[in-house]
Image: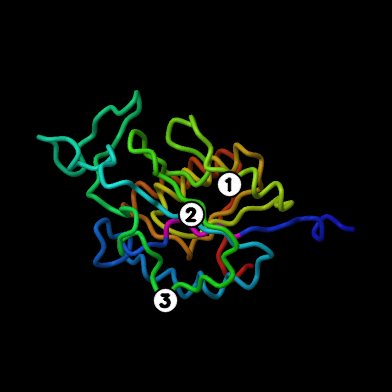
Amino acid sequence: MNTKEALMKALILIDIQHDFLPGGALAVPGGADIIPVVNQLQPRFELVVASQDWHPPDHKSFASAHPGKKTYDVIELRGLRQVLWPDHCVQETNGAAFPAALSTARIEAIFRKGTDPEIDSYSAFYDNGHRKSVGLAGYLREKGVTEVYLAGLAAEICVYYTAMDSLQENFITYYIEDAVRPLVQQEFKKALEQFAAAGGHVIHSSNL
């Protein structure tokens, strides 16, 4: 078996949910534009999995949980820097659901994150303090995955933290540049620089 044949590739769809799309509580500019790209990509991978932000209504990352604070204020939460977000992706609400336009037939598993009200979870692998695993790394290893390709929202937050954890878990890791969108473009530029410096790769879907 040659090296190329030995590589098992997984596509991970990060938080492609109503609240991160236009009209959502925490809308990412142009977020819906990635859906056709993501749908076209899925048949090219042996394994497709997804992450889903799944917050309880009293999550401490919400500004509404802190009287006197406003959205996008920064506080310390359990020893970690925490941006206070608008209420979003609350469990069992439409905002947490996948959009109908997203093809989900090939998604073999969904990893829900942000379920602990006391700590946020940007990454699909761990909470922000790396105190608890979501279980994704073990699942990918059990499936024999060696390469991870990332698509989703928001590019410089949840996709970035997932990408960095993927590298830490020793997966060969790729951002699919036309299958992500950032909340803040300038922050995404910094995120990509840090990702590349850590050994990550950036690829366009046309090269897959």
The residue positioned 57% from the left and 43% from the top of the image is 135
Image side of residue 144 versus residue 41, left or right: right
Where residue 169 sits, quadrant-wise, is top right
Query: Which is the main secondary structure of the residues drawn in magenta?
Result: strand
Image side of residue 64 versus residue 165, left or right: left
Discs 1, 2 touching: Cβ within 8 Å:
yes
Q: Amino acid at mark 3?
A: Ala
Image side of residue 201 versus residue 157, left or right: right
**Part of the protein shown in magenta:** 11-15
Question: Seen from this angle, which residue lies furthest right?
Answer: 1
Q: Position of residue 111 (x, y in %)?
A: 51, 52
Where residue 93 sits, quadrant-wise, is bottom left
Q: Position of residue 147 (x, y in %)?
A: 67, 52
**Crowd band around label 1 with a 10 angstrom C-alpha radius: few (<14), some (14–19), many (20+):** many
Discs 1, 3 touching: Cβ within 8 Å:
no
Q: Observer-nearest residue: 81 or 138?
A: 138
N-term-proximal mark, 3 vs 2: 2
Colouring scheme applied when the structure was drawn: rainbow
Q: Observer-nearest residue: 199 or 38?
A: 38
Q: Observer-nearest residue: 115 or 136?
A: 115
Which quadrant would the N terminus be assigned to in this image? bottom right
| Dot label at residue 101 | 3
| Dot label at residue 136 | 1
The residue positioned 66% from the left and 45% from the top of the image is 171
Q: Position of residue 85 (x, y in %)?
A: 25, 45
Q: SS of the residue at dot 2?
A: strand
**Crowd band around label 2 with a 10 angstrom C-alpha radius: few (<14), some (14–19), many (20+):** many
Q: Distance between the Cα atoms at labels 1 and 2? A: 9 Å
| Dot label at residue 51 | 2
